[in-house]
Amino acid sequence: MQQLKLVIPKGSLGERTLKLFSEANYAIKGDDRTYRPYINDPELSVKILRPQEIPSLVEQGAHDIGISGEDWIQESQSDVEILTKLEYGHVKIVLAVPEIWEDVKSFSDLLRKFFVKGNPLRISTEYINTVTEYILKNEEYKERFGDKKPLVITPWGKSGENPSVILHLSFGATESKPPEDADAIIDNTETGTTIRANNLKIIEQIGDSQAVLLANMESLKDPWKREKMSDVLTLLQGVVDARKRLHIFMNVKEENVDTLLATLPALKRPTISPLAEEGWVALNTVIPRDLFIELIPKLRKLAQGLVVHTPRQVLSLEEIRKLNTFKS
């Protein structure tokens, strides 16, 4: 039997990824030490890896499809197809320095602070490639060093030509590095709480990221794999869309239907059915969740009763087919 090779993340993205699949009616089971869990679709095989590794391994064809963060696609410079954004795992990539440095409010300020002292600037980060690009675009840096790349230090060696700015590869707990092991950090954060708890302040945001469904470019050329990817995309996108919707049922007088229809932002025209009592109809539709409170005053005046459900999935198949326009 043919199988589509799926790789999903562990760590901070892992729990939310498993929840996404569960809501999409996939059952993924295994104990905490299992990296090859069971899934209730025999046409899928699943492996769990660190999100940092997933984009490059999908690009190489070790896996057909996977979930990782946009930040790790950029950092690994992987050539993969992003099938859809999954709208969780939102983080910002930020530059942070000790909060006592009141005179440092930007990266240019930070560079000038160390140029004046004549000391090398040490930055701890997991994002070596991303940060190198960011530094090379800075006008203050270009004025002093041109296109010289900062010195990069990892456990496996050194690269780069400019020892005045040094990037140290971090393997986690990056916020703990200043002041002994680094002068500044570039790291991802959801709320900034951990950064502030370590007496640091954010002075610049250099990017943002969320979880995405990504695919191998060659796998997309295989008709069977492409169709299977479309099935996975449909089910996951249905959950993403459902989280932004509410399913509402109401009884309405026929004379109020036209007014109500002009009010409701439905996916399509709502379903309307006559009730046993003459002059009344039942109406049900799906609306954007963020408009519900705004609609309540109108619904309260026009409807007799209202039942609200949170949908598990909203499979707007026509819209999902539009998403299924992969490059290859």
Image: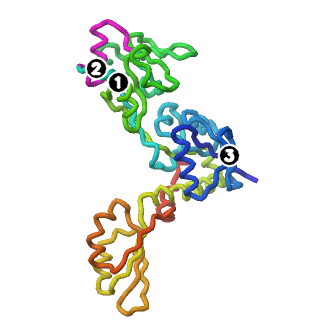
Q: Amino acid at mark 3?
A: Gly
Dot 1 crowding, Cα within 10 Å, few <14, some 14–19, many 20+: some
Against 284, is 254 above or below?
below
**C-alpha separation, residue under disc 2 versus residue under disc 1:** 8 Å
Dot 3 crowding, Cα within 10 Å, few <14, some 14–19, many 20+: few
Q: In this figure, which colouring scheme has been used for the structure?
A: rainbow
Q: Secondary structure at mark 1?
A: loop
Q: Are marks 1 and 3 in contact (CB under 8 Å)?
A: no
Label disc, if present, on residue 172 of the rendered structure: none
Q: Which region of the structure is painted magenta?
A: 103-121
**Which residue does the numbered mark 3 point to in the structure image?**
30
Q: Secondary structure at mark 3?
A: loop
Give the residue at the far bottom of this rendering: 278
The magenta stretch spans residue 108: yes
Report the residue at 58% width, 56% height from top.
Answer: 230
Name which of mark 1 and mark 3 comes first in the sequence.
3
Against 80, is 303 above or below?
below
Residue 227 found in image quarter: bottom right
Q: Is residue 2 left or right of residue 20?
A: right
Q: Are marks 2 and 1 in contact (CB under 8 Å)?
A: yes
**Which residue does the numbered mark 1 point to in the structure image?**
199
**Which residue does the numbered mark 2 point to in the structure image?**
100
Report the residue at 40% width, 18% height from top.
Answer: 178
